[in-house]
Image (cartoon, rainbow, N blue to C red):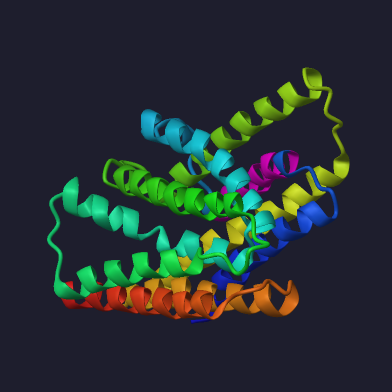
Amino acid sequence: MIYILFSVCCSVIVSILLKLARRYKINVLQAVSFNYVAAAALGLFFFRPEPAQLLQAPPLLSLSLGIILPLLFLILASSVSKAGIVKTDIAQRLSLFIPIIAALYLFGESFNTLKIAGLVAGFTAIILILMKHSGKSKSQHFIFPILVFIGFGVVDVLFKQLASHLVIPYTTVLVSIFLISFLVSILIVLYRIFIKREKFQLINVLCGLILGAFNFGNILFYLKAHRALSAEPSTVFAAMNMGVIVAGSIVGVLIFKEKLSKTNYFGIVMALLAILLITLSIHHAV
């Protein structure tokens, strides 16, 4: 379970770093670009992929993910900054319902009662969590958690599609995607520097490398948790998602003083219930 704890910590730290970025005037786009440098370098070090295999990843899916991921990271940063860590982390975790629905309509999987109950609880949680705390809240801020929910759901579907077409190790494909994401994001950075005359600062590189280390750590420890508990994948799934929701909520409320209504808190409980029901449905299916 120590790997799950480390993975949860890395995930929440990523949200904290994105929250602090605006306060300290860090250029998030530049930081996100170099986040992928760190993630790719650490992937090469820990996973040791064969160089020739890096070019054998499914081209269309890898390219799609390589383009979507940096854009989604920017949306994630905006959501953390404007809607808060609590709502963003929960939106990200509840995005798992999109691949579940895709599994029903695209891949013909059957639904049991627990999974249907989990979906109902999950979508109820989203509505309750995104409800405004007061009249002072800007309703447009809640578009960002919704985009996080949709974006991570689409990415999850693409990754599942990718996994079903692999002839090389999954970790090798991850490194390839990180490299593509870096190329995509650095092209945007160069455009903004040379065309928009945006200033380039080394502090953004340093922050990006730190961000990338924790981003990669989240993935690495999650994979290690699945290997250590290979006979209990539903345990890893539940502990990871519920852990991030609880830890993110604690950090958001206690450290960053994010304001939540009683309705929002009830939504958090519903989100945890949804994760539990989905986990039980997976275990029941097995």
Instruction: Give how far across and how far down residue 84 sits, in percent.
Output: 64, 63
Q: Quadrant of residue 194?
A: top right
Residue drawn 65% across the image and 51% down it: 77
Residue 248 seen in render: yes
Instruction: Give how far across and how far down residue 143 sits, in percent.
Output: 53, 49
Q: Quadrant of residue 192?
A: top right
Instruction: Give how far across and how far down residue 189 sits, in percent.
Output: 72, 29
For the residue pair 152 and 168, the one nearer the viewer reads as: 152
Start-end of magenta stretch: 30-46
Q: Is 150 above or below relative to 257?
A: above
Residue farthest along the front direction in this orientation: 135
Residue drawn 74% across the image and 76% down it: 255
Q: Is 162 above or below relative to 126?
A: above
Left or right: 166 with respect to 114? right
Left or right: 207 with respect to 116? right
Residue farthest along the top direction in this orientation: 195
Secondary structure mainly formed by the magenta segment = helix
- Is 242 magenta? The answer is no
Q: Quadrant of residue 58?
A: top left
